[in-house]
Amino acid sequence: DRFEQVPAANLRKGDVVLVRAGEVIPADGEIISGVASVDESAITGESAPVIRESGGDRSAVTGGTRVLSDWIRARVTSEPGHTFLDVCAAPGNKTTQAIARGARAVACDLYVRRLAALRDLPCLRVALNATRPLPFRSRFDRILVDAPCSGTGTLARNPEIKYRLKAADLAAYQARQVAILRNALPLLAQGGRLVYSTCSLEREENEAVIAKFPGAWQTGMRLPGREAGDGFFFAVLTC
């Protein structure tokens, strides 16, 4: 195959990019061949790299992350200028990456003081309670629900969680997560993609939440101890 070097802003959905070790992945995409270690710290805040490869739930890659070893070929899945809704945005890492890719972003959070961390970003900032109907008339090409959760995937860094977390708390977290997801899903545009994620390892906050919303969800989980870094869960739904 023949490849040519082009600016990331010129890439369009369906284009195929070759990314080698040391290079930044220029756009959101799906790996179609290759396997690589990828630094996603700019998105997740985690310093430990992850393995991305074609097929299954490890094939999605995010623009702005960096390939550390080997290489991948990925098909671009987003267009510059896509609209992006970050429902629980603070501290703003993921909104920052979306803007760098050219997205027109709206960043939301429950607290005005937490949105202050995003004040230098060229995006609309909205303080709202996402468990209530969201105040948007238009739909979004990309939606991220990085939901408030118990944080049990971060026990290695936050051991106090196991002393303060009660079984009843999981039901309360789930009710909040279901409400947020129920309000976000109707705002997803046709052909759009929604990502639901938590830093919890509990089924009540993960599989049991998305099970209330039938669809072809792609899911994945990182387990601390088996893989480096904090644990987390994600589920991706394409409309």
Image: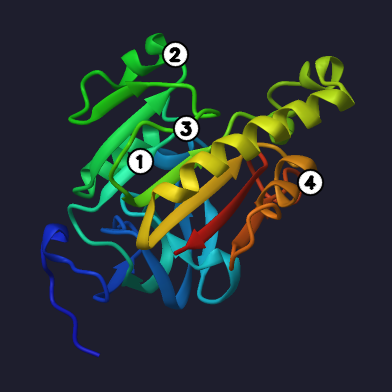
Does 70 sit above or below residue 199?
below
Q: Nearer the viewer, mark 3 or mark 1?
A: 3
Residue ID at (13%, 70%): 5
Q: Along the polypeptide, which appears first: circle 3 or circle 1?
A: 1
Q: Is residue 43 left or right of residue 156?
A: left
Q: Depth check: 198 or 26 in front?
A: 198
Does 156 sit above or below residue 97?
above
Q: Along the polypeptide, which appears first: circle 4 or circle 1?
A: 1
Label disc, if present, on residue 133 of the rendered structure: 3
Amino acid, disc 1: Leu
Q: Which residue is mark 2?
A: 111
Q: Which residue is mark 1?
A: 85
Q: Which residue is mark 4?
A: 203
Q: Nearer the viewer, mark 2 or mark 3?
A: 3
> What distance separates the C-alpha of mark 4 from that of mark 3?
25 Å
Label disc, if present, on residue 66 of the rendered structure: none
Q: Quadrant of residue 213?
A: bottom right
Q: Along the polypeptide, which appears first: circle 2 or circle 1?
A: 1
- Secondary structure of the residue carrying tag 1 is strand
> What distance separates the C-alpha of mark 2 from that of mark 1?
16 Å
> What distance separates the C-alpha of mark 3 from that of mark 1?
14 Å
Q: Nearer the viewer, mark 4 or mark 3?
A: 3
Q: Quadrant of residue 32?
A: bottom left
- Secondary structure of the residue carrying tag 3 is loop
- Secondary structure of the residue carrying tag 2 is loop
Q: Along the polypeptide, which appears first: circle 4 or circle 3?
A: 3
Residue ID at (44%, 13%): 111
Amino acid, disc 4: Arg
